[in-house]
Image (spheres, rainbow, N blue to C red):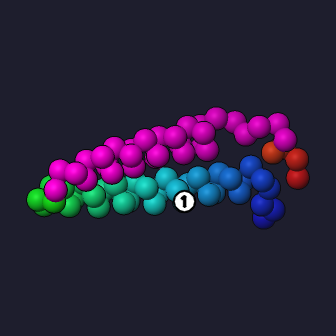
Amino acid sequence: MQLTHATALRLVCKFFIVFHAATGLVCLYSLLQGASANIIGNIALRVVAVSLFYYYGLYTKPAKYFNHS
């Protein structure tokens, strides 16, 4: 399997999505268990990060210069 620039970027974005989603769920779980309400900002930031990584990393097509092998 040859790893091109676009494929590598998509792989990194998938990792970041999983990482931020998992830590967001851990923060949400800790909030539900009685942690300080100050953690809500962190959860919101994780949701924004996951959304942006999904949109720019997986949903949109890569730029033209990433299509070469």
Q: Residue furthest left?
A: 34
Q: Residue furthest front?
A: 38
Tell me the amino acid under the disc marked 1: Phe
Give left or right: position of 34 versus 51: left
Per the image, label 1 sits on a secondary structure element best described as helix
Circle 1 crowding by C-alpha within 10 Å: few under 14, some 14–19, many from 20: few
Q: Foreground: 2 or 5? A: 5
Q: Residue at x 52, y 56 (%)?
A: 16
Q: Quadrant of residue 20?
A: bottom left
Q: Foreground: 61 or 35? A: 35
* Quadrant in the picture for the N terminus: bottom right
> To which residue does mark 1 refer?
15
Give left or right: position of 41 versus 62: left
Q: How many marks?
A: 1
Q: Residue at x 46, y 46 (%)?
A: 50
Give the percent coordinates (x, y) of residue 32: 15, 55
Magenta stretch: residue 54 in it? Answer: yes
Q: Quadrant of residue 15?
A: bottom right
Give the percent coordinates (x, y) of residue 12: 62, 57
Give the percent coordinates (x, y) of residue 41: 30, 46
Q: Foreground: 39 or 6? A: 39
Q: Which residues are magenta?
A: 36-65
Q: Is residue 65 above or below residue 31?
A: above
Q: Main secondary structure of the magenta part?
A: helix
Q: Residue furthest right?
A: 69
Q: Residue at x 77, y 60 (%)?
A: 3
Magenta stretch: residue 57 in it? Answer: yes
Q: Residue at x 63, y 57 (%)?
A: 11
Q: Quadrant of residue 56?
A: top right
